[in-house]
Image (tube, rainbow, N blue to C red):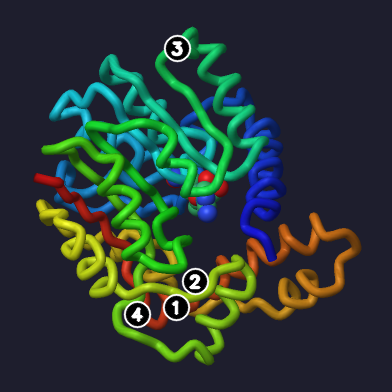
């Protein structure tokens, strides 16, 4: 299954659901997990809720006042909007879905920021044609790379000296066989070739000269990690195979992949981590 087509359908569903809940705004259009709050560690961890992670990242990225910022796999651009509300600069988003790009661009237009916030439709490799950046952020997108050394190479080429990189994503705590039911289910549902471990990420980025500033474990804020029971997925599996039309099957598969991911969190096999790197 192609990830681009799946994101096209998922984005439209998310947009419709935001519309039904009220006015369309960037902070209502996040395609990453909604985190739970943590007690007593306010600045060190994101606040809970739909937009907490974006606000937390934006605060941190803005500290160095980067002039040009990339969001790799930007979704509707919610992280970039949060940043653009804090500081002036040039904010560039890259994602595969035409609908995501069109919606993000129209939100920027409505805010009168179309010259600051631009969005591009294309695969990760398009990054080589977007120029260089002082900071980069990738929320739940780096894990879509088949090979992490390729991700590190692409990002290293586009990041300016002394630039910062922020990666937030799901990582296997330790290697699991491809035949593991939830690994296989997640990969089949989301069109991924494999899942990556924390160690693989660290080795790939260290190998391209990135220096680690911070590795923050946000797993305790993932709802599925704290859930008391693993979610069931039988009817979603049936829907992903049997519903009429590829769009409905693709949407069911998107949710089915989420169930497999939740089961990996519930079994303590997955970690949600934020890595902050600099490239000297
Ligand atoms: C889980 S969503 C996260 C979106 C956004 N970062 C957020 O937090 O709301 C993953 C994003 O990565 C993008 N993506 C996945 N694989 C990609 C690829 N091969 N090339 C470009 N974008 C990709 C998707 O289109 C989507 O925008």
**Left or right: residue 1 compared with residue 73:** right
Q: Please determine whether, in this image, residue 214 is positioned above or below residue 191.
A: above
Quarter occupied by the N terminus:
bottom right
Q: Which residue is mark 3?
A: 115
Neighbor class of circle 1 (other Cα within 10 Å; few <14, some 14-19, many 20+) is many
Q: Are marks 1 and 3 in contact (CB under 8 Å)?
A: no
Using the image, tell me which numbered label, if any, was put on residue 264. 1
Secondary element under disc 3, as helix, strand or loop, is loop
**Label 4, residues with CA under 10 Å away: few <14, some 14-19, many ≥20:** some
Q: Mark 3, mark 2: which one is toward the viewer?
A: 3
Q: Residue at x 44, y 21 (%)?
A: 117
Residue, disc 2? 261
Q: Quarter of the image holding residue 184?
A: bottom right
Decide which of tag 3 and tag 4 comes sooner along the chain: 3
Task: Give the left or right position of residue 229, taking residue 237 as reference.
Answer: left
Q: Give residue 47's quadrant in the image.
A: top left
């Amino acid at each position: 299954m192609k990830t681009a087509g799946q994101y096209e359908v998922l984005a439209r569903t998310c947009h419709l659901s935001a519309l039904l809940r009220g006015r369309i705004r960037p902070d209502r259009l996040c395609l990453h997990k909604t985190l739970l709050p943590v007690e007593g560690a306010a600045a060190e961890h994101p606040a809970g809720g739909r937009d907490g992670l974006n606000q937390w990242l934006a605060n941190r990225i803005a500290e160095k006042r980067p002039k040009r910022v990339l969001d790799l796999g930007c979704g509707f651009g919610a992280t970039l909007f949060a940043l653009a509300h804090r500081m002036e600069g040039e904010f560039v988003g890259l994602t595969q879905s035409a609908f995501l790009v069109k919606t993000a661009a129209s939100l920027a237009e409505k805010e009168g920021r179309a010259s600051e916030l631009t969005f591009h439709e294309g695969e990760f490799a398009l990054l080589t044609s977007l120029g260089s950046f002082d900071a980069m952020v990738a929320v739940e997108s780096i894990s879509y790379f088949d090979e992490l050394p390729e991700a590190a190479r692409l990002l290293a080429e586009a990041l300016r000296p002394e630039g910062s990189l922020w990666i937030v994503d799901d990582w296997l705590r330790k290697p699991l066989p491809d035949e593991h039911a939830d690994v296989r289910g997640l990969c089949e549902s989301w069109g991924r070739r494999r899942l990556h471990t924390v160690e693989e990420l660290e080795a790939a980025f260290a190998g391209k000269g990135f220096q680690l500033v911070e590795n923050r474990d946000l797993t305790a804020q993932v709802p599925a990690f704290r859930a008391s029971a693993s979610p069931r997925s039988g009817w979603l599996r049936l829907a992903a195979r049997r519903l009429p039309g590829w769009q409905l099957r693709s949407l069911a598969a998107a949710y089915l992949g989420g169930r497999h991911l939740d089961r990996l969190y519930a079994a303590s096999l997955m970690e949600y981590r934020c890595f902050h790197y600099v490239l000297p």
